[in-house]
Amino acid sequence: MAATQFAASFDGEQENMYQRDETTELTVRNHRADLLVEMQDICKSFGGVRALNNITFSIHRGEILALVGDNGAGKSTLIKVLAGALIRDHGDMIIEGEMVKTHTPRSAREQGIETVYQDLALFDQLDVTTNFYFGREITTKLGLLDKREMSRNVKLFLEEFGIVIKSVSQRVGTLSGGQRHSIAIGRAVYVNRNPKLIILDEPTAGLGVEQSRNVLQLIRELKKRKLAVILISHNMDHVLAVSERILVLRSGKLVAEKRTEATNVESLLQAMLGKGNEDAK
Amino acid sequence: MLFLILGVLLQKTRFGTYTYGIGANNEAARRFGVDVRRHLLKVYALSGALAAVAGVIISARLNSAYPNTGEDYELMAIAAVIVGGSNLFGGEGRLIGTLFGVLIIEVIRNGLNLIGINVFWHKALLGFIILIAVISRTLASRES
């Protein structure tokens, strides 16, 4: 995507010119075959407020893509459009080479897109197994819950992903913050028969160092299994630790796309806040 | 018999899981595909049916039926459920706990009758028991 096209769309404001470094351009072209989702010229408004303004990006299989930006930049709106929770006003969405006209949360799940929102959507009073299987329980021939089978499957899954908890029969409300986040992420992978993309909204929010490390390690496990991950986070250290590419949003616009290895916190903050914020430092 | 059937319904079926789930996290239940409104309609219909069964049993016991039979029983039912360990806001509780709650409430009520306490004080005591149960439960959850 030529930088000049984006310069024109920003009405010649040089400080808002979309920046994609050469390494990113080359990498994107080489990974065309692994392209999972393409979002082109996505726009979304709420009344008079333009929440998303011609956002174009793509994500590949097994890639960890971070989405950063200040509050109100449009990150949550963008992932809600991707997850089918919001309908885009304009733009194209292409999933595995196929144009998607109508996109709902159900169709997103059917296409392997799962979202873990910040509230985690866990049932604190219910046990881990019930949380994992909620909505798609295994039953016996008599129509009763097959708790033994479900517990066994969940146990195996947790072991495979290195999620450590005392027992799958313990209530989720008794787990630590890190374990709860891990359970929520694990569940998102588990509930989908064919998971391809997991969207994580602030997966380390409110977690301590050790717990955050466990969650980041889990995210790397997802990548090993060829799952793509889109990660929204305000924590730049975590973003730099785990992602491969970083998209920066500001006021609904995509203002920068950087390879993680070629950037740093300062550069990301500059892009997030814009040059005009230099006086505030 | 009814107790056993309802116990199985709550603990061993999807219906029971969704009932607990909606009580624990309404929004999450909706996100996982449960039609919350429809399910609650079923729960309230079941509650109404069970109230009707209770009405039939009382009428059979008293050999008569009055329109205001069972007035104020709802407070006792709530007290029994809370004393039995169920969460006032939903999501957790066991039928066996409710059974013990009923027994406790009835033993206390019967005892008050035997020692001649005015019946109007029964409700006050019931309210006090509910208050204690809720406070102790809240303190216990904060600690855990």
Image (spheres, coloured by chain):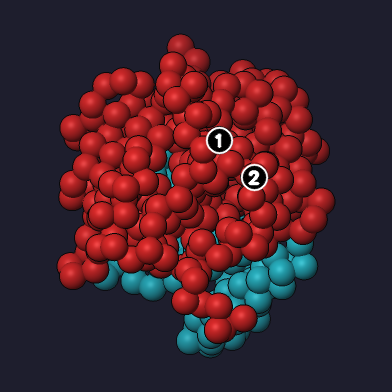
Chain colours: A red, B cyan
Q: Could you tell me residue B112's position as x and y percent?
A: 61, 78
Observer-nearest of B116 and A199:
A199
Spatial distance from mark 2 to mark 1, Cα to Cα?
9 Å
Give the amino acid at mark 2: Ala
Query: Mark 1 — on which chain does it sit?
Result: A
The residue at the point 48 percent across, 87 percent down is B120
Observer-nearest of B142 and B8:
B142
- Judge left or right: residue B81 versus residue A209: left
Q: Is residue B104 above or below residue A165?
A: below
The residue at the point 67 percent across, 54 percent down is A264
Query: Mark 2 — on which chain does it sit?
Result: A
The residue at the point 62 percent across, 21 percent down is A225
Secondary structure at numbered mark 1: helix
Can you tell which mark lies on residue B34? none
Q: Could you tell me residue A105's position as x and y percent?
A: 32, 38
Q: Quadrant of residue A270?
A: bottom right
Q: Is residue A62 above or below residue B74?
A: above
Observer-nearest of A119 and A205:
A205
The residue at the point 25 percent across, 55 percent down is A9
Q: Are marks 2 and 1 in contact (CB under 8 Å)?
A: yes
The reply to whether residue B115 is visible in this rendering is yes
- Judge left or right: residue A28 versus residue A280: left
Can you tell which mark lies on residue A23? 1
Q: Residues within 10 Å of mark 1 (few under 14, many from 20)?
A: few
Give the amino acid at mark 1: Thr
The reply to whether residue B104 is visible in this rendering is no
Residue highlighted by disc 2:
A262
